DNA sequence: TGCACGATAATCT
DNA sequence: GATTATCGTGCAA
């Protein structure tokens, strides 16, 4: 039987830690830790894949201006934006620019670090399920981390939120980049970032070269 | 009407 | 094993 390692020490990132441009933030977040402290316990994972959605970008929800749904994208960098799509899935994003500028970063995949049993339970997967299937893909990530509308529009770097960003638990590997996945508009823009050689990223091998 | 997806099946190497 | 096709689902515009 493998010994259970003690939970890693994770320190909260502050807003000052976050780069001030959305693209820089999307790159910066690779290797950092996403944490959700739930009633049932802590869920934490290494962020291994992100995508940036920018001003003037037809694929961004903010493209047509502020609506009731996308308002969090226009908040100062560090706020969550959660939305529901395809009748099945929640997507977790974080705002990336100044107050009033609608940009964000989509969390696409994470490597489970802590609360793995909770993740399995949320995903309704057996204990035998492979670790890399728990949070590979934005819908799976949200499900594993118990993300829903209750954590929409919260400040993830205010030092006290249940959903927050933490320091890296280990050094990150080389950064890769590619086109974004699953969109039709502005599909040629290279705004997806991932940790190379990670088994926990989504997409085809070709995209992850 | 169409979507920042995932599970499954079909069709490859 | 890897890539590609199909389709359900609820909601925003």
Image (cartoon, coloured by chain):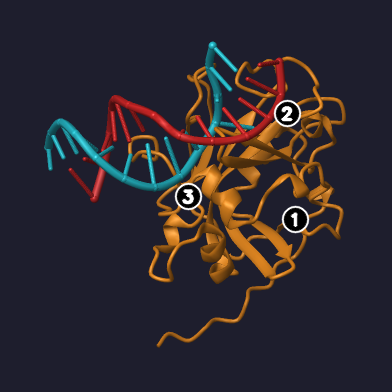
Chain colours: A orange, B cyan, C red
User: Residue A180: where, in percent of width, then height?
Assistant: 50, 29
Sequence-first disc among 3 and 2? 2
Which label belongs to residue A65?
none
On the image, numbered disc 2 is attached to which residue?
A103
Give the letter of the chain under mark 1. Answer: A
Q: Identify the image quadrant of the N terminus of chain A.
A: bottom left
On the image, numbered disc 1 is attached to which residue?
A164
Q: Secondary structure at mark 3?
A: loop
Q: Secondary structure at mark 2?
A: loop
On the image, numbered disc 3 is attached to which residue?
A136
Mark 1 surroundings within 10 Å by alpha-carbon count, few (fewer than 14), some (14 through 19), many (20 or more) = many
Q: Place residue A41 in its image quadrant.
A: bottom right
Q: CA distance from mark 1 to mark 3?
A: 19 Å
Give the letter of the chain under mark 3. Answer: A
**Residue A152 position (above or below residue A160):** above
Q: Place residue A64 in its image quadrant.
A: top right
Residue at image location 54% in from the left, 65% down from the top: A121
Nearer to us in this view, A10 or A88: A88
Mark 2 surroundings within 10 Å by alpha-carbon count, few (fewer than 14), some (14 through 19), many (20 or more) = many
Foreground mark, 3 or 2, reads 3
Residue at image location 72% in from the left, 64% down from the top: A38
Q: Secondary structure at mark 1?
A: strand
Sequence-first disc among 1 and 3? 3
**Residue A186 position (above or below residue B4):** above
Sequence-first disc among 1 and 2? 2
Q: CA distance from mark 3 to mark 2?
A: 23 Å
User: Residue A192: where, in percent of width, then height?
Assistant: 53, 34
């Amino acid at each position: 039987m493998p010994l259970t390692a003690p939970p890693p020490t994770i320190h909260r990132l502050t807003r000052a830690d976050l780069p001030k441009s959305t693209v820089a933030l999307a790159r910066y977040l690779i290797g950092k830790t996403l944490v959700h402290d739930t009633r049932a316990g802590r869920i934490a994972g290494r962020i291994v894949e992100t995508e940036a959605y920018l001003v003037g970008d037809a694929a961004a929800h903010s493209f047509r201006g502020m609506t009731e749904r996308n308002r969090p994208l226009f908040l100062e960098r560090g706020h969550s934006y959660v939305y529901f799509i395809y009748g099945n899935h929640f997507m977790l994003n974080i705002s990336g620019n100044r107050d009033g500028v609608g940009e964000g970063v989509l969390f696409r995949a994470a490597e489970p670090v802590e609360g793995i049993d909770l993740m399995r339970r949320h995903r309704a997967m057996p204990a035998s399920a492979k670790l890399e299937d728990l949070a590979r893909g934005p819908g799976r990530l949200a499900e594993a981390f118990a993300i829903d509308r209750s954590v929409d529009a919260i400040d993830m770097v205010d030092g006290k939120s249940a959903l927050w960003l933490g320091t890296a638990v280990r050094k990150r590997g080389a950064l890769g980049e590619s086109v974004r996945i699953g969109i039709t508009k502005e599909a040629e823009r290279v705004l997806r970032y991932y940790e190379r050689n990670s088994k926990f990223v989504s997409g085809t091998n070709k995209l992850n070269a």
